[in-house]
Image: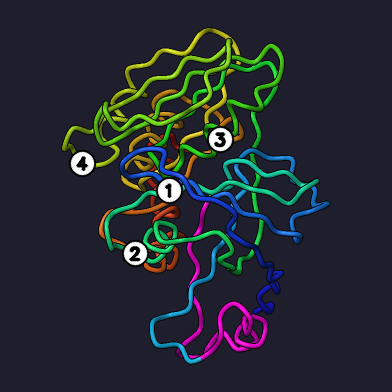
Amino acid sequence: MAPAKKRTLRHGTVTSRRWLSDELIRLTVTSSDLIGLDLPYTDHYIKLLFPPAGAEYAWPDDAAEVLEDRTRPDAPVTRTYTLRRVDTETGEAEIDFVIHGEEGLAGPWARDAEEGDRFAFFGPGGAWAPPAGAHIVLAGDESAAPAIAAALDALPAGTSATAFIEIAHQRARFEMPEPEDATLHWVARDGATPGTALAAAVRDFTPPAGEVAYFIHGVAEMIKDLRRFIFVERGVEKSAASISGYWRLGMTEDEWQSSKREFVAEMEASEQAATGS
């Protein structure tokens, strides 16, 4: 087995914090490590690093030394977040966090972050940008909203879009771009299982004639439903869709990432059996 590719450790500093809604907070950060990078996509993400409680090292000052041995029991864990905006000339970026009280690592950290707080991260990664000339269907929950917003900001001339954002309830709306050639739909869960209302909204939508591309991300159970709908029922080519789970019900990110490959393989096998391909 080939050794894992070594990831580049980067550092950043929090410069401001503001609430977008009762459950969504935005940090503006700066990192000289972002200056000059080629970041052509709208779904760029970073992996924030968090040391476990009780770790006996200075963070992030000792990050490079600690990461030399990822097998150590007090090694930091990662949490993945999309960059809402990033300026590679200044190194400034925006990151949005969904807050669920004291749950998780990144949410409480973002809620309590202050100007001057330093952090460490890997990335950015990314692979998708809105193609020119197509009608683009964008769908996701709060975790996917930053990438959807970035895509709406970057729509090429002559490209139209329909976006669906699932939120807890209609009062939980937050700022989103609405360019002239795009339509934005807010889909309220209203107590339903995450992803079910969003999946129903996408299934009920009939895109205009012509080329259509899809960007759909969020809870894994919704992704399983909509992958089958798009690839099996509608017969969309997989090259025309970016669709994957950012998280899964009842799992931490570590648990989800360790099981994601198997989850995707099972979906693909089911889709192949249904289409005979």
Residue with the mark numbered 3: 238
As measured in the structure, the alpha-carbon distance from the residue carrying label 1 to the one carrying label 3 is: 15 Å
Identity, as a three-letter code, of the amino acid under mark 3:
Lys
Identity, as a three-letter code, of the amino acid under mark 2:
Gly
Residue with the mark numbered 1: 245
Residue with the mark numbered 2: 104
Q: Which residues are magenta?
A: 57-81
Does 79 appear in magenta? Answer: yes
As measured in the structure, the alpha-carbon distance from the residue carrying label 1 to the one carrying label 4 is: 15 Å
Q: Position of residue 251 (x, y in %)?
A: 31, 62
Identity, as a three-letter code, of the amino acid under mark 4:
Thr
Point out the tag, 2 or 1, that comes first from the N-terminus.
2
As measured in the structure, the alpha-carbon distance from the residue carrying label 4 to the one carrying label 2 is: 20 Å
Check contact, mark 3 vs mark 2: CB within 8 A. no
Q: Nearer the viewer, residue 119 or 70?
A: 119
Q: Secondary structure at mark 3?
A: helix
Point out the tag, 4 or 2, that comes first from the N-terminus.
2
Q: Nearer the viewer, mark 3 or mark 2?
A: 2
Q: Nearer the viewer, residue 71 or 214?
A: 71
Main secondary structure found in the magenta portion: loop
Question: What residue is rendered at 45% in x and 29% in y?
Answer: 175
Q: Position of residue 214 (x, y in %)?
A: 52, 29
Q: Secondary structure at mark 2?
A: loop
Question: What residue is rendered at 61% in x and 54% in y?
Answer: 29
